[in-house]
């Protein structure tokens, strides 16, 4: 009987030991596979990127504003502005496929090639009126050096960006700066692509008209034929289309005075100097801005010029060729091709 009791006791102890061992192993397995009630519970608050405003903005790429560096310091601007007032550069805003709510049409409007696009834009005056600008409730104001003295007034109305004038930048360089402000940088690149393609087609059209290396001068008659001015490729008057588009070359003296100097525009030259500036020009373009060919056509100085003798003088309507923006430049290229074909 005593042996039986000892055997029973040993068996009982063995059963209890085995049960304890199995229980311990089960707990270790749960910890190893990561299954816990804390992570499975939907009521437990867990921070995720979507729960953080800043992290959510970065992840979605939908930031409403961004900070940019300008000559006036850092400015927080809308990522995709909706109500732009362009005290300058409104031509470029239009070329980029956007329509500003307001612009200084009095000062910078009037291109015959932008008549339809400018319709409906509120003219804020020239000089621009802060009250007129504020009434439009803009979310971005774009300006240039002409508005430098009034910058602080406009900056109180809305985020304001001043892009200073730089004669070394082309209108297409300006377009890149403006496009970046509007949140559509690819649109500026497309403007360049479109012009280059159109210019290539124009050169092909004139292949039988223009000789290789042909030179052209762009001048304006001033002071009732007493003086004249000379223009380069980056100062309106059809220069971009003539020199950059059609690849006409500069007469030697004009290259020296206007291009090599970086001036782009040399005014108030004595008419007696004109033959020196255009003696090797195959074509002379005269921008009529009040004083045209009629002022000089009978002068002895004018009659000595080779391009005049060969009837290769083309008068440009100042109202059409004064403007220097992507839309106007494209239209001017078409007109200049027609004018050259008529010679």
Image: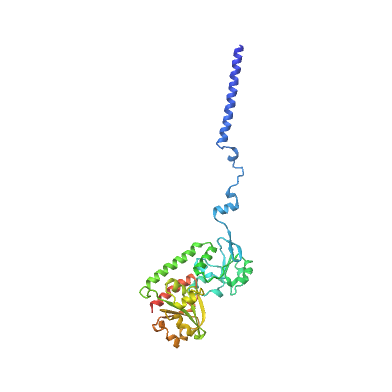
The x and y percentages for residue 224 are 51, 86
Compared across the picture, whether 138 is left or right of 175 comes to: right
Q: Nearer the viewer, residue 42 or 342?
A: 342
Residue 200 visible in this rendered orientation of the protein: yes
Q: Is residue 34 above or below residue 166?
A: above
Task: Give the color scheme: rainbow, by chain, secondary structure or one colour.
Answer: rainbow
Image quadrant holding the N terminus, namely: top right
Mark yes or no: residue 298 visible: no
Horizontal and vertical percent for residue 32?
Answer: 56, 35
Left or right of 100 in this view: 243? left
Q: Residue at x 62, y 12 (%)?
A: 2
> Which residue is most to the top?
1
Number of numbered labels in the structure image: 0
Q: Position of residue 239 (x, y in %)?
A: 46, 74
Residue at 59%, 49% (x, y): give it. 51
- Left or right of 29, for residue 256: left
| Residue at figure coordinates x 60%, y 69% from the top left | 133
Please tell me which residue lies in front, 111 or 253.
253
The quarter of the picture where the C terminus appears is: bottom left
Nearer to me, 112 or 167: 167
> Where residue 194 sits: x, y (%)?
44, 66
Q: Identify the image quadrant of residue 35.
A: top right
């Amino acid at each position: 009987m005593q042996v039986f009791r000892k055997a029973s006791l040993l068996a009982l102890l063995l059963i209890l030991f085995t049960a304890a061992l199995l229980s311990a192993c089960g707990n270790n397995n749960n910890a190893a596979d990561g299954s816990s009630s804390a992570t499975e519970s939907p009521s437990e608050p867990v921070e995720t990127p979507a729960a953080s405003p800043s992290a959510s903005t970065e992840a979605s790429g939908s930031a409403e504003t961004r900070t940019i560096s300008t000559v006036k310091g850092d400015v927080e601007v809308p990522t995709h502005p909706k109500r732009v007032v362009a005290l300058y550069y409104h031509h470029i805003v239009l070329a980029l496929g956007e329509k500003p709510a307001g612009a200084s049409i009095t000062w910078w409007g009037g291109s015959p090639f932008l008549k339809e696009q400018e319709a409906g834009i509120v003219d804020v005056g020239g000089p621009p009126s802060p009250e007129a600008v504020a009434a439009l409730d803009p979310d971005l104001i774009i300006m240039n050096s002409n508005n430098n003295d009034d910058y602080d007034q406009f900056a109180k109305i809305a985020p304001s960006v001043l892009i200073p004038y730089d004669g070394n930048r082309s209108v297409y360089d300006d377009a890149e700066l403006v496009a970046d402000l509007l949140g559509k940088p690819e649109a500026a690149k497309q403007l360049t692509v479109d012009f280059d393609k159109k210019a290539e087609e124009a050169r092909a059209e004139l292949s039988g008209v223009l000789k290789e290396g042909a030179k052209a001068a762009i001048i304006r008659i001033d002071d009732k034929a007493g003086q004249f001015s000379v223009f380069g490729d980056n100062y309106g008057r059809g220069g971009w289309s003539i020199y950059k588009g059609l690849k006409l070359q500069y007469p030697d003296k004009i290259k020296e005075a206007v291009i090599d100097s970086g001036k782009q525009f040399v005014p108030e030259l004595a008419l007696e100097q004109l033959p020196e500036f255009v003696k090797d020009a195959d074509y002379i373009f005269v921008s009529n801005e009040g004083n045209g060919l009629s002022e000089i056509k009978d002068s002895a100085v004018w009659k000595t010029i080779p391009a005049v003798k060969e009837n290769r003088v083309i008068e440009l309507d100042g109202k059409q060729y004064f403007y220097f923006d992507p839309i106007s430049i494209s239209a001017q290229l078409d007109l200049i091709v027609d004018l050259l074909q008529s010679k």
